[in-house]
Amino acid sequence: MNSKEEAQIRYMVVEEEYRGFGVGRAIINKLEEFARARGAARIVLNARNSVLGFYQRCGYSVVGPGPTMFDKVKHSKMEKILQDGP
């Protein structure tokens, strides 16, 4: 939790061999449940540009540029408004 209203997902990854089986979606669902239970109105994250589609399918929107890690791994800042809070 960054504040009472904002949660943040950090350093999430699913090993390549387990992708496509719903593992990432299950993790996201649990993290959103956790955030809602604590009163968060939104969740933010910085996603590698190569996985933006995954987060968009989970309901997240790009809201701006994120950091570039190791001088080459570009990220985008994303956000999801939690419509059905506690």
Image: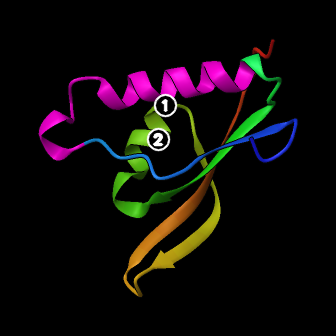
Q: Residue at x 57, y 40 (%)?
A: 60
- Label 1 Cα neighbours within 10 Å, binned few <14 / some 14-19 / many ≥20: some
Q: State the predominant SS element of the stretch in magenta.
A: helix
Identity, as a three-letter code, of the amino acid under mark 2: Tyr
Q: Which mark is residue 12?
A: none
Q: Magenta span has 31? A: yes
- Tag 1's secondary structure? loop
Identity, as a three-letter code, of the amino acid under mark 1: Cys
- Label 2 Cα neighbours within 10 Å, binned few <14 / some 14-19 / many ≥20: some
Q: Which residues are magenta?
A: 15-36
Q: Residue at x 56, y 74 (%)?
A: 67
Left or right, 51 with reference to 17: right
Residue 53: image quadrant is: top left
Determine the residue located farthest toward the left in the rendered image: 17
Q: Position of residue 11 (x, y in %)?
A: 46, 52
Q: Position of residue 68 (x, y in %)?
A: 49, 78
Q: Which mark is residue 58?
A: 1
Q: Residue at x 61, y 25 (%)?
A: 32
| Residue 73, above or below 80 | below
Residue assigned mark 2: 55
Left or right, 61 with reference to 27: right
Q: Are marks 1 and 2 in contact (CB under 8 Å)?
A: yes
- Marks 1 and 2 sit apart, C-alpha to C-alpha, by 5 Å
Left or right, 66 with reference to 58: right
Q: Residue at x 21, y 31 (%)?
A: 20
Between 81 and 15, the one lying in front of the other is 15
